[in-house]
Image: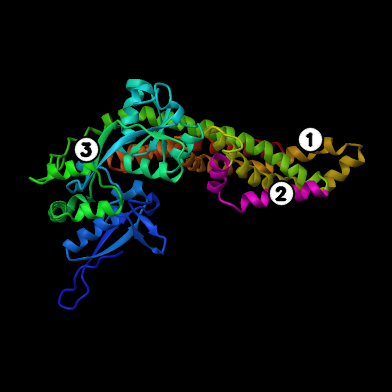
Amino acid sequence: MTLLAPLLDGQEPATLRWGGDAEGGAPFVEADPADPSRVRGFDVEVAETIARGLRRRPVFVQVQFQQIDASVERGDFDIGMSGVEDTPARRAEHAVSAPYFEFREVLAVRPADADRYRRLSDLAGRRVGTLAGTIAYDMLLAARTSHGVVPVSYDDDVHPYSDLVNGRLDGVLLDHIIAARAVKRSGGFVIQPEPAATGRYIVVLAKRNAPLRDRIDGILLSAMRDGTLEGIYRRWDVWDEGQRAFFARAAGGQPQGAARAEPAAKRPVLETVAAYLPSLLGAALVTLVLSCAAMALAVAAGVALATGRIYGSAPVRAAFTFYVELVRGTPVLLQLFVLYYGLAAVVNLPAFVAALLGLGLNYAAYESEIYRGALEAVPRVQLEAARTLGFSEGQILRLVRGPQALRLALAPMTNDFVALLKDSSLVSVITVVELTKQTAIFATNIGSWVLPGALCAAMYLAMSLPLSRLARRLERRWGSAS
């Protein structure tokens, strides 16, 4: 359903470009099954209501949920919606509307744990998942300090619940709308009735767009009073007594929480860095350990693949070639998802182990091609001379062919390790909080990528540059020795 603003003097109305994330799904924003080029959901209808009030034509712009704030400031669209939460940090960095929906943070647990895990304080030492960059994630960080809860962040709201059912998590803390949708979709868990907190959804605009924000506030308040929003929420089955009480508080003026507070004073740069640096350093250590372990696996498996393709029988060569082409021809993200989620019913791998295997086995295919090329580059006359002297093929590989191939392979191996170090950022999709993921959380919390991005880049350089220099020194030393 798309509502168009009325034409003015026969002219096409101006557009209201609004950003949202269709990956969030119903009832927020989802692709219309009847026409996937269009979107539907209660946020879609709220955006259309705003556009109609502004006498504009709504135009949807797809954007990743975590990037809505940054994109609206860049001017990619006029307003951002899609379950955007009202937070002090967002109010300080952007222009935000009056809240138009009140949600409850609810705890989901497995049925067997329903009696012992009623609230966050019961989950000391237990893993609890949620979306990164949300109020729920901030609550889990606070609960880590106060109750020893172990927060686990996700980039989507589907896999936390599947991991809960599969036993990888002990609880999930998310908005009641998301929890209700998930339990209808798959089941396997229960929602505790006592909410952990309440929050509100708002429309976010660029800070310079305060005049437009004020007009939107008037439209939203009018839609609350005349029943427009209630009708939308009833159509999408998200209306309840909590919304009725929220609207009642709004009837006499602005809704609770919508007062225009002065932006919080920004902390000095050094204080901000000091607050987040321990988390970034811890995530950098995860990145380094994961990258080193994955590279070790890639080297060992790559050597096996390369030698098998050169010295193995025809079936071995065919099998190894198939593996190399399969891995190189499919995205590493797909391989990570298959290892972590696809095989969960067969083997329930821990996230770090799945990340290690995914990166290591993926890079093994590329390493094997480097080693195979290096081994085949050794002059055949040297191999024939070694055979004439009575060397076995194993001795030739170990004493003649291997050392020379290593010199040839060193430079591309170093390049691959640096690439793997950066590709380790992909493992955040299976809940491993490495350096890039922690940086994204940092940026979301302070509303800017400038400082977090600079720190993240500096840490990656600090890890990769020494390795590159070491490789160059080895190349020079071995080159002079030859």
The image's mark for residue 398 is 1
Which residue is most to the left?
252
Q: Residue at the location (22% across, 41% down)?
A: 241
**Image location of residue 378, percent across then percent down:** 77, 46
* Residue type at the position of mark 3: Pro
Q: Are marks 3 and 1 in contact (CB under 8 Å)?
A: no
Quarter of the rendering containing residue 399: top right
Q: Quadrant of the N terminus?
A: bottom left
Q: Nearer the viewer, mark 2 or mark 3?
A: 3
Q: Is residue 49 toward the left or the right of residue 331 in the image?
A: left
Determine whether 258 is above or below 1 in the image.
above
| Residue 458 can be seen, yes or no | no
* Residue type at the position of mark 2: Gly
Q: Give the magenta-colored segment's residue range.
A: 314-342
**Image location of residue 280, percent across then percent down:** 39, 32
Per the model, the C-alpha gap separating discs 2 and 3 is: 57 Å
Mark 1 lies on a secondary structure that is: helix
Q: Which residue is mark 3?
A: 88
Q: Nearer the viewer, mark 3 or mark 1?
A: 3
Q: Which residue is mark 2?
A: 373
* Residue type at the position of mark 1: Arg
Mark 1 crowd level (few <14, some 14–19, many ≥20, 10 Å Cα): few
Does the magenta run of residues contain 334? Answer: yes
Mark 2 lies on a secondary structure that is: helix
Per the model, the C-alpha gap separating discs 3 and 1 is: 63 Å
Mark 3 or mark 1, earlier in chain = 3
Colour mapping used in the image:
rainbow
